[in-house]
Image (cartoon, rainbow, N blue to C red):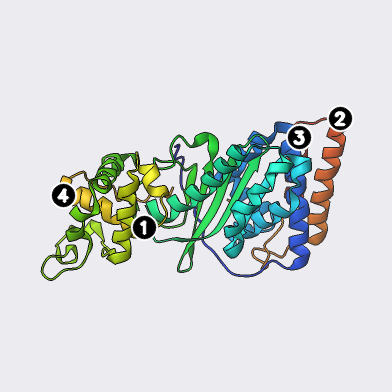
Amino acid sequence: MQKTGAVNLPLHGGKAPRWLFERMVKLSGAITEVILYEYGQEEFLKRISNPYWFQAFGCVLGFDWHSSGVTTTTCGALKMAVNPQEHGIFVAGGKGRTSRKTPEEIEKAVDLFSLSSKKIDELKYSSRMSAKVDNSCVQDNYQLYHHIFIFTEKSKWVVVQQGMNDSHARRYHWMSDNVESFVEEPHSAICCDRAENALDMTSKENKEARKISVDLVKDGPVHLEKYLTKKPNKSLMEFSMPEHHWIKDIDVGKQGMKVLQRAYELQPDNYEELVSLKGMGPKRIRALALISDLVYGSGLSWKDPVKYSFAHGGKDGTPYPVNRQVYDSSIKMLKDSLENAKLNNKERLGAIRRLNTYIKAR
């Protein structure tokens, strides 16, 4: 994974009015068509997985100055704009309950893209594991509430998902070409405006802890019970730990022990398989990590893995209101440029350059 810098995402309120969102759909569709025509599907995925490009994309659509909703509304507009049959790209998922419909939406690609059931299962697994890793393996105190899974007819994919902690948002970017392992630094980027005290089990520095976690489960939960459940005078809760370990709710309880027993019976081959098991959530993953450090001295990395801009104005009037005429002209320019390109009057990046010139003149 390449960590190239930091992105600050301070949020402020406001809601995109219908007239603006309708234009966002049109403009996102026009930009998408230009990129697909000029560079192809893989380049489109590469840009969506790039946090700087994605932030710029959202700002051009009307979310200047990092307004709240830059992730969810931009993805929502993109989902409405992309036509799978025409573009060869499918956008699944969304915010809240819609995110949980991702697997069934992926299944619709069986007929659309003629993908085998094996490929569909692999896509659903990728969607599920990316969400589980960011909720359970990257323990940064951000709860996921938005998950978008974009994939092509060739089964290449990207994930853009976001978590919330109080009033702060954190966005996670994934791209299939960059994922060698779901549990070892799989992200293209993680963006936020502040760092947390985080247990990152995807860090290369936690490789030994991952291995020991699997060994602990395969040896049987009976050996772990003394560490994982509260008992008088013999509880990990009473242990004096270094300050950086910030232990929260380490008691996994009876249900947690049942999950570990099922994991023992299945005998997972590796850490990814362990994490993928049903019920293996943040608490159990954290408990195994702490025991691997406490008992076996594996050491743990607690480094937070977290690592632009206005064009048309902001949806809430900051730094100035969206100019509808300018916005409509930008959409028309991109569409006209695309039509001209199809007629072989092709200008590489001409649409984007003209958009940039027009905005500066504004």
The CA span between labels 2 and 1 is: 55 Å
Q: Does residue 203 lie above or below 228 as drawn?
A: above
Residue 122 picture location, percent across and down: 55, 40
Instruction: For marks 3 and 2, give the one nearer the viewer.
Output: 3
Q: Amino acid at mark 2?
A: Asn
Residue that numbered label 2 is attached to? 345
Which residue is at the front of the view, 205 or 103? 103
Residue closest to the far left: 233
Residue 249 numbered mark, or none: none
Which residue is at the front of the view, 289 or 360? 289
Please say if the residues under marks 3 and 1 sit with CB atoms less than 8 Å apart.
no
Residue that numbered label 4 is attached to? 295
Please say if the residues under marks 2 and 1 sit with CB atoms less than 8 Å apart.
no
Residue at image coords 35%, 39%:
270
Report the side of 50 relative to 322 (left or right): left
Q: Is any part of residue 40 visible from this angle? A: yes
Crowding near pointer 1: few (<14 within 10 Å), some, many (20+)? some
The CA span between labels 3 and 1 is: 42 Å
Crowding near pointer 2: few (<14 within 10 Å), some, many (20+)? few
Residue 331 picture location, percent across and down: 80, 50
- Dot 3 falls on a residue whose secondary structure is helix
Residue that numbered label 1 is attached to? 282
The CA span between labels 2 and 4 is: 68 Å
The CA span between labels 3 and 2 is: 13 Å
Residue at image coords 58%, 58%:
99
The CA span between labels 4 and 3 is: 56 Å
The CA span between labels 4 and 1 is: 20 Å
Q: Amino acid at mark 4?
A: Val
Residue that numbered label 3 is attached to? 37
Q: Amino acid at mark 1?
A: Pro
Q: Does residue 231 lie above or below 308 as drawn?
A: below
